[in-house]
Image (cartoon, rainbow, N blue to C red):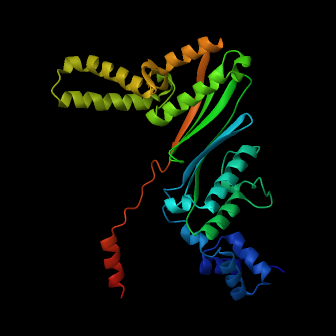
Amino acid sequence: MSISATLVKELREKTSAGMMDCKKALEATAGDFEAAVEWLRVKGLSSAAKKSDRIAAEGTVFAQVVGNTGVILEINSETDFVARNDGFRNLVSDVAHHVLNAVNAVGDILEQAFHKNPTVKVGTMLKEAIATIGENIVIRRFEKYTASANTIVHTYIHGEGKIGVMIEVAASKPEATSNPELKTFAQDVALHIAAMNPMAISSEQIPADVVTKEKEILTAKNLESGKKPEMIEKIVDGQIRKFLAENCLLDQPFVKNPDLKVSDLAKQVGKTIGADVTVKRFVRFELGAGIEKKSNDFAAEVAAQMKGH
């Protein structure tokens, strides 16, 4: 039977369920409005949309390599408790599987056909998981690297999913990619990145506007502290060199041996395996970074509740 757009809209307004879910509910109940409400409640979909405005800043960072392709993703939940739930973990695994296997895992992931079941979109699968698990869940970000003939992709997870790193390391000779020393190097550098959070591989990769802003801050700071104006430029140049060294991976002291820079470590490993070793790219996800978390004032919450009685 044909379901009118007006009826779908009314059901959506009443239940806060998704438009397509409302259409499905009405189709499944032959247009019976109350039965459709019940259908959505049974499926747990009537509350999924209402949960979507809750702040999700917990969750996990997950990463894995399958074959020559690696994936890293951050999926957020509202509480750490749910992040340890098997249903949540299964969802994370399903999304990682989708990103690894989807031909074009870019753009709006929620609009993509879910790889395990192409008849539904990833967004629909996520909505069903929200309804089942009972918390807002957000697929926040993800990256996918595929190794070439002379590179390897490696992932590292720290603190049970609090920080994740994915790295691609290159060797000048393709045969060197099978040397276990190269994998050890990738693991060591990934661990270093997790600990030291570099902005970029080298100073050339740090955006010019970041350096300009840092110069402005340092200039103002030095003037404020009473340094002579004619000396400011020279002082700031030195401080910028220090800033770049502290924030560029290759210039940072290696976390396992601060007497070596990461660039020195790469040279050492290169000599061992008989090929030039370089870090091609990396990505680092820290759980909840940049998400403003709500701080619940319990006393104010109780007071607000008391006013309502």
Q: Quadrant of the N terminus?
A: bottom right
Image position of 224 with respect to 130: above or below: above
Q: What residue appears at the point 19 percent right and 21 percent down from the top-left corner?
A: 229
Image coordinates for residue 13, horizontal then vertical, percent = 60, 78
Image coordinates for residue 143, horizontal then vertical, percent = 62, 41
Question: In which image quadrant can residue 235 be found?
Answer: top left
Q: What residue appears at the point 61 percent right and 37 percent down from the top-left corner?
A: 155
Q: Is residue 121 left or right of residue 280?
A: right
Q: Report the front residue among 197 and 138.
A: 197
Q: Count the marks.
A: 0
Q: Residue furthest left?
A: 226
Q: What residue appears at the point 53 percent right and 48 percent down from the top-left corner?
A: 160
Image position of 306 with respect to 238: above or below: below
Q: Is residue 295 left or right of residue 190?
A: left
Q: Report the front residue among 13 and 41.
A: 41
Q: What residue appears at the point 66 percent right and 47 percent down from the top-left corner?
A: 107
Q: Quadrant of the C terminus?
A: bottom left
Image position of 6 with respect to 296: above or below: below
Image coordinates for residue 79, horizontal then vertical, percent = 49, 62
Q: Is residue 105 left or right of residue 298?
A: right
Question: In which image quadrant can residue 211 be found?
Answer: top left
Residue 3 seen from this side:
no
Image coordinates for residue 84, horizontal then vertical, percent = 56, 58
Residue 12 seen from this side:
yes
Q: Report the front residue among 242 and 159.
A: 159
